[in-house]
Image (tube, grey):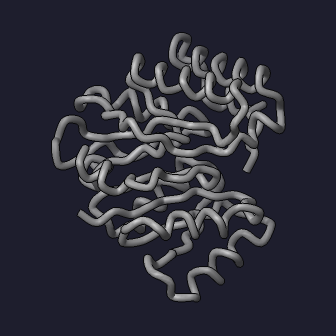
Amino acid sequence: MNISIIIPVLNEEKIIAETLAEASRHNVCEIIVVDGGSVDRTRKIVQEYSSRGIAPPVKLVMSPRGRAGQMNAGAGAAQGDIFVFLHADCRLPADAIQAMRAVIERGCAPAGAFDLRIDSPLPRYRIISWWANARSRATGIAYGDQAMFMTKSVFGRIGGFADIPLMEDIELSGRLKKLGGIAFVNKPVLASARRFASRGVVRTVLEDWLRALRYTLFDADPALLAANYPDER
């Protein structure tokens, strides 16, 4: 089964070239970059990379700002049998393709996601990563930086990501549970520590947990939760 990597971006000129180089190392049929209205050189860098003709082909898609809508737009342009949604500041594990195909072919779950490892040697980040992985397995909820993946047919069956400004990953996980849940792959996606570096580790962790709890336990409006969300893109 062919795999499409879908990357939503916004003002990622500092990292997008490295992201594409890393993603291109995997045996996929295409990489789709969905720009949400960048005002920096992000689109130009993607276009320059695409013009080199390096396999796999890189496609640039335009979409209104918002990760959910951007990922839906990328899925709409994708030709693969399996979609993997990758944040621009995350890197797939070396054997990600084999792992995704194994999950899909076994049919143990309609979708999958990887473990998470924050890209820093500091002990605090190892603790955060361990806790995030334990939480995902306990709740059955995958977060965006865990590179969620599923077949094109499953994505179409559930109607894609909900058109909400935040918590689209948690909302989608809830609908996937009704189809059989998410299989978590014991191989880590490497995620940038930039969010923590920008706002502080304790503050970032507490704010993230509080938003998730307000959404899952008290059905808080995603628009209100997104009002003060620090989008580091």
Residue 229, x across and y down, in percent: 74, 33
Q: Residue furthest left?
A: 106
Residue 42 in which image quadrant: bottom right
Residue 98 in which image quadrant: bottom left
Residue 4, x across and y down, in percent: 39, 63
Left or right of residue 143: residue 232: right
Q: Nearer the viewer, residue 187 or 54?
A: 187
Q: Nearer the viewer, residue 133 or 47?
A: 133
Q: Write the residue at 47% across / 20% down.
A: 134
- Is residue 37 positioned above or below 164 on the image? below
Q: Residue furthest top?
A: 217
- Is residue 169 positioned above or below 6 on the image? above
Q: Write the residue at 69% across / 37% down.
A: 121
Residue 46, x across and y down, in percent: 63, 75
Location of the N terminus (image quadrant)? bottom left
Q: Write the residue at 52% across / 43% down.
A: 163
- Is residue 130 positioned above or below 17 on the image? above
Q: Residue furthest bottom?
A: 52
Q: Write the residue at 71% across / 78% down.
A: 44
Left or right of residue 80: residue 71: right
Left or right of residue 185: residue 109: left
Residue 156, x across and y down, in percent: 30, 51
